[in-house]
Image (tube, grey):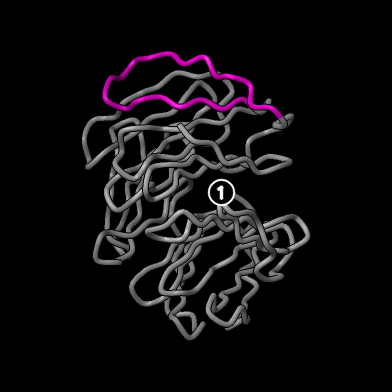
Amino acid sequence: MCWLPGGDVLLVAAKDGTVHHVEPAFGTRVLLRATPDAAHLAVARGQLAVLSREGVLQVWSLEENTLLWEHATELIAQLQLQWWKGGVAVAGEDGRERRVLVYDDAGERRARARVPSRTALGADAAGNLLLARNTETGLTIRPFGEALPVERPTVHQLRFAGADSLLGVAVGGVSVWNGGAEAVNIKLFDVVNAALSLDGSLVAMGTRVGGVAVAGTRLGGQRVNPTRVEGHDGPVLSLAFSPRGRWLASAAGRCWVWSY
């Protein structure tokens, strides 16, 4: 799921491929039918990118609700999806190694690169692609195409949460890097997913058994006891703060939108 930029409209993909348009104050409607079992959604320039768990990448026009192009990436695990100034890029494992595939707005593949394991894909404020990797020697962020350290990574599942913020999700909690600063560590057992608010002040965390918690990022070393969210009886698949900072969406078997 993802929020439309600048507003309070949430897009949620169901397992059957339907993408739902959700306005917390007004209700829900089906927007379009994309590839089933979507793993990631991302919106930019009036277009919706959908990446399925089987590695199928689609880009849709939100104005006309029509499919613009589609590719089978052959990436099947640890998937990430990122818009950049020239199109859309994906990262993932293909069963042998981790790769990044870069496409332009017309759907033509412009680059294909092999990267070290646990490399995260993101973009800077100008829309240039970035790669990040966290090892025992610290966090490294480089422009796409530059080499990354190849030593053993930490256990974190690393992901960008904005142009200069990253989240590292591990079973014992979440590490937050804001603006390249030293990591803030928040302890919570059995975390499987996390999201950062737009201003970087809050982190939402979801657990394997359906718990959801929100914590501040200003002070590190804190331990959080999550409250049980009604209806989440399985792993939290996705979390997302709205751009205006009013809502938090969480998804497992169902999708819930909460004020906080």
Q: Position of residue 87 (x, y in %)?
A: 42, 75
Whether the magenta-drawn stretch holds residue 160 is answered as no
Question: Which of these two is toward me, 138 or 124?
Answer: 124
Question: Which of these two is toward me, 256 or 43?
Answer: 256
Q: Residue at x 49, y 44 (%)?
A: 240
Q: Position of residue 137 (x, y in %)?
A: 28, 32
- Residue 110 left/right relative to 139: right
Tell me the SS state at disc 1.
loop
Q: Position of residue 162 (x, y in %)?
A: 34, 50
- Residue 121 left/right relative to 234: left
- Name above or below for residue 23 compared with residue 45: above
The quadrant of the rendering that contains the C terminus is top left
- Name above or below for residue 224 compared with residue 107: above
Q: Residue at x 70, y 61 (%)?
A: 54
Q: Residue at x 27, y 48 (%)?
A: 164
Q: Which residues are magenta?
A: 211-230
Residue 10 seen in render: yes
Question: Which of these two is toward me, 133 or 2?
Answer: 2
Question: Which of these two is toward me, 223 or 136?
Answer: 223
Residue 98 seen in render: no
The kind of residue tagged 1 is Pro
- Residue 230 left/right relative to 166: right
User: Which residue in the structure is indicated by mark 1?
Assistant: 24
